[in-house]
Each structure stands twice: as structure tokens, then as C-alpha cells.
Amino acid sequence: MNSILDNLKTEGIAIVENIYSQDELIGLAKSIGNIRPHPNGEDVATLKSSDGTNSLTGTFSSTYGLSMFPFHSDTAFWGLPARYIIMGMFSTSRCTTNYISLRDIERFISDDFLSKARRAIYLVETIEGSKYTSPVFEVNDNYGFRFDPNIMTPANDYAKVFHEELVVAMNRVESIKIDWSGNKAVIFDNWNSLHSRSAVKDESREIFRIYLES
């Protein structure tokens, strides 16, 4: 467990092999933090690949179907996004999950990037309604970061400049590609990283996701 926490602290990501069931995935989650139920009330969400036809409006599946998902943080619409995201898959998949850290992005941004972020305002639109939010937040003197281009739209000039610079920087970062070889879990630092999904081709993909509070 210490190695997992150390990897999350230093790398923002930890990969755990030999996870064979949802019960083991839940046990792993509880060893790291407190599980926060998904909006549907479940501790573990089952995500299945879909062409989007029957998906809820505003979800990634409804917008992108089986195509590649863009880089984003999960639960960006929450007042305080989930601290960690755990994903588990018990079968193999040719569709990768891709990861970039804020630390890597920072190598390609300007010195006043954080200042722009603090002044940036985004409009967040979901099926539950609309609200305005900042892309950054502070918890116990530590900064966190939220970004979801599927539901967040720049609402002032600072946000437009910030957004453009962020996208350019993201495109310059070489992402880590996570291959799903079966019976594996991946833990992401959701406050300091972004993840995406490659396109799904010729397979039925099922992945399990847990949200964790700090």
C-alpha cells in the first residue's frame, strides 16, 4: 500500500495488477480513501462502450460514441471534484486509457498561466443545469485543477486565453498509454492529471470506476 500512495504522490498514477473482482476493487479503493457514490447512487459504476444512441445527453458516449474521448478530469461539475479515480478491468481490451499529468503540462505553459487560471471563468452545463466555475481550486494550500471540454465552455476572456494555451500545451505532452491486459486497476490523481480513451473498435468494452474523496 505504501508504494501505491508513494506513486500517487510522486507520479499522480498507480497501477495495480491482479485485481479479479469488484469486491477486490472496492477493497483497494477503501484502503486509499472514502468512496463517494456516483450520481446514480452506486459505489461502482459500470461503463460500457456505446455508439451513443441510447446514452444520456451530455455524456462522453452521447457526444463521441466509439470515437476517441478527449483529455479531461472526472466530476468537473462537482463543487469539489473527486480526489482520486479508480478504474478496473477484468478482461483484455485493445482500447487504451491515456494519461497526462499537470506537471508535464506545466513544462509548456507561460509563467502567468496560474494567474490566468485564477481569473478564468467557465460555464458548466449538464443535464442537471448550468453554473459557473473556476478551473482551479485550493484545498489546504494545495491547488487542484478541473477540465472537461465536454461540459465546460470558456465564459470570459481570461478563460479563452487560458483554454487556448492549455490545449496547445496538452498537445505537446506525450501521454502515457495504459494497456488493459485484464485483472488490473489504475488509480489517477484527479486533481492534478487528465485522462482520455482511445477509439473503441470491434470489441465490447466494460470498465468499472470508483470515485474517492481525499
Image: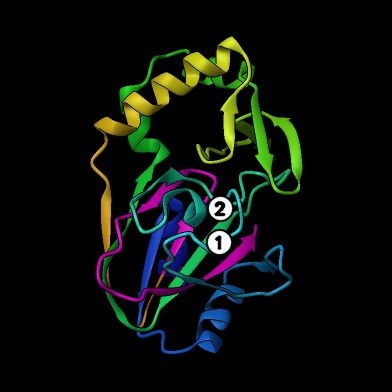
Q: Badge 2 is on which residue?
A: 59
Q: Badge 1 is on which residue?
A: 55
At horizontal 54% and vertical 15% (from top left) the residue drawn is 116
Magenta stretch: includes residue 104: no
Which structural element holds mark 1? loop
Q: Is residue 161 above or below residue 192?
A: above
Q: Residues within 10 Å of mark 1 (few under 14, many from 20)?
A: some
* Residue 2 screen position, x and y as percent: 46, 69
Span colored in magenta: 186-214
Badge 2 amino acid = Thr
Q: Is residue 49 above or below residue 123?
A: below
| Label tally | 2
Colour theme: rainbow
Quadrant in which the C terminus appears: bottom right
Magenta stretch: includes residue 211: yes
Which structural element holds mark 2? loop
Residue 199 versus residue 1: which sits nearer the camera? 199
* Residue 52 screen position, x and y as percent: 48, 59
Q: Is residue 86 left or right of residue 71?
A: right
Quadrant of residue 95 in the image?
bottom left
At horizontal 68% and vertical 68% (from top left) the residue drawn is 34
Badge 1 amino acid = Ser
Which mark is in front, 1 or 2? Answer: 1
At horizontal 46% and vertical 68% (from top left) the residue drawn is 87
* Residue 123 screen position, x and y as percent: 66, 29
Q: Are marks 1 and 2 in contact (CB under 8 Å)?
A: yes
- Is residue 21 visible in the rendered image? The answer is yes
At horizontal 64% and vertical 48% (from top left) the residue drawn is 81
